Amino acid sequence: MEKIPMTAAGFSSLEAELRHRQAVDRPRIIQQITEARSHGDLSENAEYHAAKEQQSINEGRIAELEDKISRAEVIDVSKLSGDTITFGATVTLVDEDTDEKKVWQIVGDTEADAKAGRISISSPLARALIGKKKGSSVEVNTPKGAKAYEVRKVEWR
């Protein structure tokens, strides 16, 4: 069983979603199924079929969350240090062509969110950054072509 690396914040959000799906969504869906059943013939009851489909999706997500939580390898980023980029590092990069500055934190696959500045450890950029130090130059193949970045800062937050 392969471990899934994630930050403490990512682990907490998975646990919160699991609790919500079990304590809020599951009872609500069961109530919807019960109400739909009371309307009679189930073969032509769209509300019943919709609620059953919702239940299937919710139970599937619950199983997926339980699996991820059981295989989680929580890494406390605040206890990490050093100047070499590894999982959990927050890296400030400067595009060598445009001088555009970007800040990325390298996180687990389940918690990646580019809009929030978190990239997956398995992304091409993160894979190129791992093992590099401040001042290094990194080239990454993107859908728009090759991009070159300079590592300006490595932080642990």
Image (cartoon, helix red, strand yellow):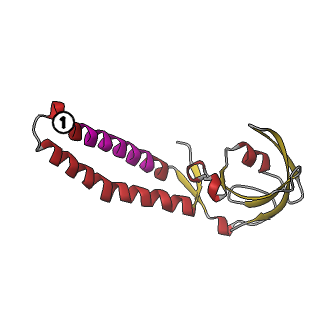
Residue at figure coordinates x 59%, y 48% from the top left: 109
Answer with left or right where residue 142 lies relative to residue 56.
Answer: right
Residue highlighted by disc 1: 45
Task: Say which amino acid is labelled 1.
Answer: Asn
Residue 53: where, in percent of width, then height? 30, 39
Residue 121: where, in percent of width, then height? 67, 49
Residue at figure coordinates x 43%, y 61% from the top left: 16
Residue 87 on the magenta span: no
Residue at figure coordinates x 36%, y 42% from the top left: 57
Residue 15: where, in percent of width, then height? 44, 59
Dot 1 alpha-carbon crowd within 10 angstroms: few under 14, some 14 to 19, many 20 or more: few
Say above or below: 24 vs 109.
below
Answer with left or right where residue 34 lies relative to residue 100.
Answer: left
Answer with left or right where residue 59 lies relative to residue 10.
Answer: left
Residue at figure coordinates x 87%, y 56% from the top left: 99
Quadrant where the image shows the C terminus: bottom right
Magenta span of residues:
49-66
